[in-house]
Image (cartoon, helix red, strand yellow):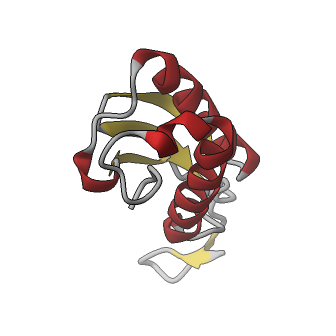
Amino acid sequence: MGFAPTGRRITLPAMPGTYHCLQFHLIFSTKGRERWLTDDVRERVHDYLGGIIRSERGMPLAVGGIEDHVHILLSWRTDEALFTLVRNLKSNSSKWIHGAFPALRALPGRKDTPCFP
């Protein structure tokens, strides 16, 4: 209920639910900007990143990139900080990459394994 300028009570319509549409563009580079996201690796990594986002109850709108970085466009929920998703994306994808592509560890001159810093 509210009051009109004349002092009479008026009934206001019920307020509909609030709608949020949070979309973010994230960019991750490979460690040292090394070009190890080759064609055979890249598509699987992109699919895996999209799966992590879905498992965190987000919506991956687009995942792409080239040999040394990944772009992610996503829709995120309001009940969790974006930081939580970024932390989980980086840690889970790095662990998965280490297990799924052991040959990347043996590249000449590599002191450490590939991951997203």
Left or right for 29, reference 61: left
Q: In the rendering, at what x and y percent does residue 101 appear?
A: 60, 35
Residue occupying the point 67% across, 55% down: 17
- For the C terminus, which image quadrant? bottom left
Image point (64%, 54%), residue name: 95
Q: Where is residue 86 in the image (x, y as percent from the top left)?
A: 51, 61
Q: In the orientation shown, which residue stands out farthest toward the bottom?
A: 7
Q: Residue at x 52, y 58 (%)?
A: 90
Residue 53 spot, x, y in % from top left: 63, 45
Out of 29 and 88, give the one closest to the viewer.
Answer: 29
Location of residue 109 in the rendering, given as x and y in whole percent from the top left corner: 30, 48
Q: Nearer the viewer, residue 33 or 85?
A: 33
Dividing the picture into quadrants, the one containing residue 13 is bottom right
In this picture, residue 73 sits left or right of residue 1: left
Q: Quadrant of residue 84?
A: bottom right
Horizontal side of 65 relative to 16 (left or right) equals: left
